[in-house]
Image: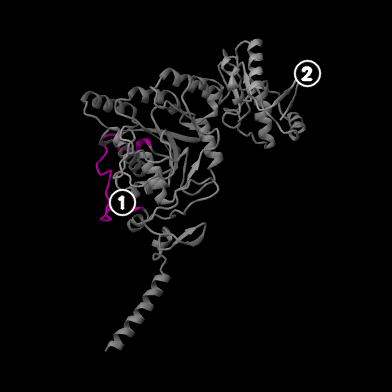
Amino acid sequence: MLLGVAAYCTVMAVILSKTLASDPKFGQLDNAWPHQSGYLEKGGKVQKDYKPNSEPSQQSVNSQGLSESLPTQKPTTLQYRERCWRANFSSPERRPVDHTPRPFLLGESAARCRGDIFLLIAVQSAVQHRARRDLIRATWAAVTNIGGDRLQTVFFVGTTNDKRQAEALRRESDSRADIVQADFVDTYRNLTYKHLYALRWIAESCRSVRYVMKVDDDVVLNVFRLRESLRELVGSRTDDFFYCQVSQVKPIRNKKIKWHVTYEEYPDDRYPDYCKGFGYVMSFGLIEKLHQCAKWRRYFWIDDVFVSGDLASALGAPRIQWEDGWGAKRLHPRLAGPEANQMVLANAGSNAVAPSLNRRVWRAIVIRSKPIRNRRHKWYVAYEEWPGDRYPDYCKGFGYVMSFGLIEKLHQCAKWRRYFWIDDVFVSGDLASALGAPRIQWEDGWGAKRLHPRLAGPEANQMVLANADGNFMVPSLNRRVWRAIVRFSDWGWEDGDAVYSE
């Protein structure tokens, strides 16, 4: 009897295994998301030493590699649990918790997110920040198409107990149709709810989006350079990733500090690498995965650490560091000049938003990103002179370095181009692009500064070049700055010969 049962079980096991192998529907669980104990697919190869429910590598990754592969098919609930549940950071019952269970109060319609969108910009705002939203609408959010790439801006807010503010928000939403309101109290410690509701809305309402950028409502965004950078630097990537300014810090345990975190809230002694919250880009494929992964984690109120740190690490999504000179700067009057095009994002930080400064910086971005068609302006360019809507990247004319091998090539290439009177655009932009010559960004702190009396001190050796930039030349100031350069440098001075030696 026992032998008969054993033989029957053996036969059935063989038949079942052959059925599973022949049916393409089976096996999708493993192929969709590598999760088997002790193994992980990486770069097409199976690697050992992967332990489920342990945190994947938290190292940021450059644009050449990935820490772990992400699923190519929609993961299952079991796979999310395997990846995202973590002891001391998740429910001990190993059950998912929906952090975004309530319906949206405003903006549930997907009318603002139809068609192909290259970049969806999700702005974290507050109910009472109408002036900031209007400022954004009047500046960088007014640009909705660059070279055929569509851009869309949506504002995300919570609720307020102030009835007048709530009614004003409803009227604003009716007239603008770009606000999404979620049903949670809008406070600083609830920012993670705002972030997760934004992920949910985007996942439910948007289908044909390539990139998503999360920003605060106190930033000025150089959408022209942002679009260029996404096209040139990460446009060839097909995986899921964050593109941001990566932060590496520890939890603050001092109870007197605003960002104090208890051990009960965050048990680890160090945060994973995460993206600084004033603004970062995500590939669209990450949106739904982040929202689902969050259900397997306990709520943590520092949203950028939670989303771009903990959840990203659990999903194996790399955080790619912004290129030098690409990223964020503190909002400052100097950005209302040539420096406006040396950044993608400027944020007010702890300072109050100054609308006039935001507008000045935005005007500088526009002026220096494309030809000026205003006939009254000094740098007016007619369509006959420059038919394109945008200049190529070019070197600012106060000073730049070229390799000697370019000299003859530039001279010969110019013979095949019509004369254009803005020399820096013509030579370091138009001709350089035709020749495929890269323009390498100066290192931070290396380059040019505005000529100023403060440069006649130790700061003289923190720059390579100082220019008057529209101001009158002051020979005495030039001499004072030069003497400071000599005095504070590490080079020896030989009197009479004007020769330096180390």
Q: For the stretch drawn in magenta, what is the main secondary structure?
A: loop
Residue 304 x %, y %: 38, 39
Type of the residue with mark 2: Gly
Q: Is residue 116 visible?
A: no
Residue 278 x %, y %: 42, 33
Type of the residue with mark 1: Asn
Judging from the image, what secondary structure is the residue with disc 1 in? loop
The residues colored magenta run 84-112
Task: Residue at 51% x, 61% y: name it.
Answer: 45
In the displayed structure image, the side of residue 475 where residue 149 appears, left or right? left
Foreground residue among 295 and 74: 295
In the displayed structure image, the side of residue 164 where residue 279 appears, left or right? right
Give the spatial CA distance, label 2 vs label 1.
72 Å
Image-quadrant location for residue 384: top right
Colour option used: one colour
In the displayed structure image, the side of residue 197 where residue 408 appears, left or right? right
In the displayed structure image, the side of residue 221 where residue 217 appears, left or right? left
Image-quadrant location for residue 449: top right
Residue 482 x %, y %: 66, 18
Magenta includes 107? yes
Look at the picture and state if 457 lies above or below 47: above
In the picture, the quarter occupied by the C terminus is: top right
Image-quadrant location for residue 18: bottom left
Badge number at residue 88:
1
- Mark 2 or 1, which is nearer the eye? 2
Look at the picture and state if 497 lies above or below 277: above
Judging from the image, what secondary structure is the residue with disc 2 in? loop
**Mark 2 Cα-neighbour bin, 10 Å: few <14, some 14–19, many ≥20:** few
Badge number at residue 393:
none
Residue bearing mark 2: 496
